[in-house]
Image (tube, rainbow, N blue to C red):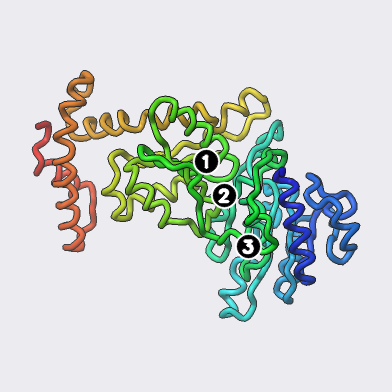
Amino acid sequence: MTVRDALNLALDEELERDEKVFIMGEEVAEFDGAYKITRGLWKKYGDKRLIDTPITEAGFCGITIGAALAGLKPICEFMTFNFSLQAMDRIINSAAKSCYMSAGRYPVSIVFRGPNGSAKGLGAQHSQCFGAWYMSVPGLKVMSPTSCEDYRGSLKAAVRDPDPVLILESEILYNFEFPLSDQAMDKDFVIPIGKAKIEKSGKHITLITHGQATVYTMQAADILAGQGIEAEVINLRSLRPLDWEMIFKSISKTHRVMTVELGWPRCGVGSEIVATIMENPIFFELDAPAIRCTGIDVPMPYSEKLEYECTPKDYHIAEYAKKIQIQFLHLIILYLYPMDLVYFSNQVYILHLYKLQAIFLKVEYRLHQLLVDQYYCTIHHIQDIQLDLGHGT
């Protein structure tokens, strides 16, 4: 089954299950949807359940939020999430905050869905990933599915959830085929919002990804497996909330982690994950720095060849994952040793491996003391630690 068909079937079942559910957006009714996701639904359910709109995202987004406040369960379709910028005020200041600001009296049960991120030849204005944008907003739940099971279970969970949920889809994946289990075909099959999935088990490195990037990450894991590196791939599926339990458990097994996403590097999904890892005790399970593999920090080029190289593909991800250990050693030596000792041979790297374990144990103990004494870990404290260890020894 294709992702397109999985979405269409899930929408059909939810419209049939609950008469309060309706779909509103550009070309969703008579035209069967810009991507044919709503194909055949207008003929089956009529004008009251599938409503075409003009090209006015701020207008029809506001209407659907008002309908949700009145007790209906709208599904607001954006032809692309790039157009949701026109409705940002409605989504963030009305949908996300109304329940909190009314002390729970006015929940907003609504689904915002549509293509997110880059496709092919859409240019800079239609190729942005909004995962990090929306996952930063309290009051929203954000899903980023990959497979047919993900899409089907995420959509059903979103429709039945009392809070506003955004489903960030991929235009590229609409034509992809994935197997569906008998369990996933059940009409009441849902994926719990906030629950990730281990797509591939491994013991050497954890690769954390979501959406379209999961496809490339799985391909990269196969490349790494051919070189003796067993990567564990976590498909987040949910960006807000994140499944920290699964992430931390995987890191405690592999002791290395890399995030993979197609969006920009600054303030991205990976940035949040890496920062949270560094702020928690799971940090001490790492044998190398937590790093990010992201899209390039530029507006998306229109040129097909440049566009292809602007987001991580399988070979980018595999090559970046292999460099984690040597980058780790290089960074430590740069920090702990004088600049004139940087150009060491490979043998020197190996000799210093035995020193690094003892160094980290001392640093961990010292930082723990600082925290107990309620000091801030400023650059002065770091310098103190360096002096205690013996600079350059």
Kind of residue indicated by mark 3: Ala
Kind of residue indicated by mark 2: Gly
Element marked by disc 2:
helix
The residue indicated by pointer 1 is 261
Cα separation between marks 3 and 2: 18 Å
Q: Is residue 308 visible?
A: yes
The residue indicated by pointer 2 is 131
When the figure is inspected, residue 175 is found, relative to residue 105, above or below; the finding is above
Q: Which mark is residue 157?
A: 3
Q: Which mark is residue 122?
A: none
**Of label 3 and label 2, which has the lower sequence position?**
2
Q: Is residue 337 left or right of residue 66?
A: left
Q: Position of residue 19 (x, y in %)?
A: 79, 71
Q: Is residue 344 visible?
A: no
Kind of residue indicated by mark 1: Glu
**Of label 3 and label 1, which has the lower sequence position?**
3
Element marked by disc 1:
loop
Cα separation between marks 2 and 1: 10 Å
Q: Is residue 211 left or right of residue 304?
A: left
Q: Quadrant of the N terminus?
A: top right
When the figure is inspected, residue 22 is found, relative to residue 236, above or below; the finding is below
Element marked by disc 3:
helix
**Of label 2 and label 1, which has the lower sequence position?**
2
Q: Label 2 neighbourhood size at 10 Å, few (<14), some (14-19), many (20+)?
A: many
